Amino acid sequence: MRLLQALFFPPEQPGGVSSMIPNMQERFQSSRWDMELFWLPRRIRNKGHEEVVFDTFDWTEFQDSPIVLKYIQTYKDYLWWTRLRIQKPYDLIHAHHPIAGLAMKQVFPDIPLIQTVHSSYERELILNGLIEEGGLEHRFLVSLYRELEMQSERMLTVSRSFADYLAPFLARPEEMTVIHNGFDEKRFKPVPHENEVTQLVTVCRLVPAKGLDILLKACAELKKDGHDYVLHIIGDGPFRKELEMLAQELGIYNETIFYGYTLHPEEFMPFFDIFVLPSRAEAFGSVFAEAALSCLALVGTDVGGIPEQIEDGVNGLLVPAEDYVALSEALEKVITDPMYRYDLARTAWDKAKSQYSLTQSVNELKKYTYNIKLKAWDSMIPFRFIHAADLHLDSRFSGMPGVSDRIRQQLRESTFAALDHLVQLAVDQEVDFVVISGDVYDASDSSLQAQLRFHEALERLGRVNIHVYLIHGNHDPLDSPRIRTKDKDHVHVFGPKVGSFTANRRSDGQPIAVISGISYPTSKVTENTSAYFKRDTDKESLFHIAMLHANVNGDPAHETYSPCTTKDLVATAINIGLWAIFINAKR
């Protein structure tokens, strides 16, 4: 599937979506996925002249505002650049800014669009004193949400809190889906360290919405109370001069370091102790997750999506916005008690690893991508699986006199190596399921090692949600003693009569196939069991796979078990779809 990620800011822009999406790209590069990035270069100004018309509101009602006119011109520039640069088709477009999404839909109306709304531009402008709530600009910007809803096949956002904020502006707010931002753990490497003086750090754009004036006032209180610290402010913005002057007025300029714009702050963030950001508004607050992955103690405000990341007193501390006294008291707690600080940091690290991993976000995005694309598919859903059989784990390989014990041991170990390769192939190829058509073991040689190794392989597949469908053959019939596999939720074992399971796709849980099979109750099965397979007419739209362990065409090299002919199989295949069958080979 060809997927285009439509950004607004270039990938080198630090923070938020611009730093997250490029890290997702390698996770999408596989035989089934091809992901590319697109954005508007900063040098593109006043190139677009295309007429702009929205379906849900008349933007010209707001054209008396210079901010609105600038927004519309940027939209025209994005249209111009898109038409100029994109020639090849995509299966789906995922946009990360209203301008990007609306422009892409205008240029490519037939390509499905997923729109993620990452933040509230209007709230930031209000908090930064650039527009008034209820004014022309505010009403224009919130009107765009309804337009996005109409033009998108699916709208996503980054926190439950922000979804609630968007709800009044949408016709169907219940259809909004939350996918938290994901972060590549490899970028964050916590470093054990001890600082003689507590090191505070904040990373953000220097604008009033981030509340750094409150942070400086809180730090002034800390100094009054005799607490030593250094405050590191990483980032730049129009509020920097005012903040530097405020630090001087409060008498904490010597304790404060203004770094300005810095690339890759995650490389030295682990050497600090406490991350603090008293934001006045945050849709999600990606930097908190990044600080948590650096194993810093977190201190934030109870606004927006921050409380979804921080549980007060458990994995960080929360204070009311605008309350510098409460912020000072929270900072005092983690400055004066290093063990408490470490406990908070460790718990925050655990939560960020489990809930905000890049892999998890990619998998959720793939799920919704598939769901959207399914609407355009009229035929059966494509899927990928592996068919294996006759593993004969830990087989003694009889009939080889004169072979040294070393070679014989290597041969026995080769069966386990084959199993390991099978599992790794399934993981690497992102298969939806694995079918094993009998004879995992030798009935008379079902060693404990073989059973344990096989169950370890099943566990590995289960950890990545790859289901296994298993029938038992003449060498490992149902009545042979062994560790039971049916106790695992992702392992489906067929019984002595033909049964069926519905296989689902890993990415989205979508039904993709009906798998039928029959196991040997004992090692002696002499009837033609292929005759019992029938198509499930209630699931006609799904692909059908039949699993059978049989002796086809009376091969004299094997015993007569479940005998059938090629003609039998072909006749049944007309109704079934595909046979997953195996005939034992001489070992």
Image (spheres, grey):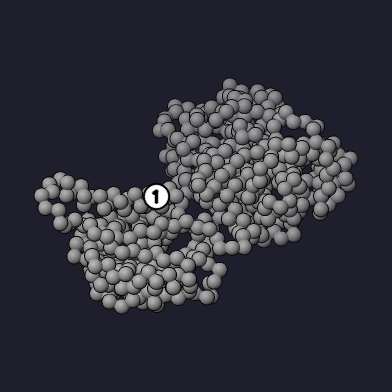
| In the image: residue 28, left or right of residue 423 | right
Q: Residue furthest left?
A: 402
From the top left corner, tell me how far across and down residue 9 is, in percent: 67, 36
Residue 220: % across, % down: 60, 30
Residue 145 visible here: no
In this rendering, position of residue 380 left or right of residue 323: left
The answer to which quarter of the image holds residue 98 is: top right
Q: Residue 482, how many percent across, how many down?
A: 25, 66
Q: Which residue is mark 1?
A: 425
Residue beneath the point at 77% across and 37% down: 80
Image point (52%, 41%), residue name: 26
**Height in image: 156 above or below 71?**
below
Figure check: 251 above or below 455: above
Q: Residue at x 27, y 52 (%)?
A: 416
Say which quadrant the C terminus sits in: bottom left
Residue at 16% x, 49% y: name it. Answer: 408
Q: Nearer the viewer, residue 259 or 418?
A: 418
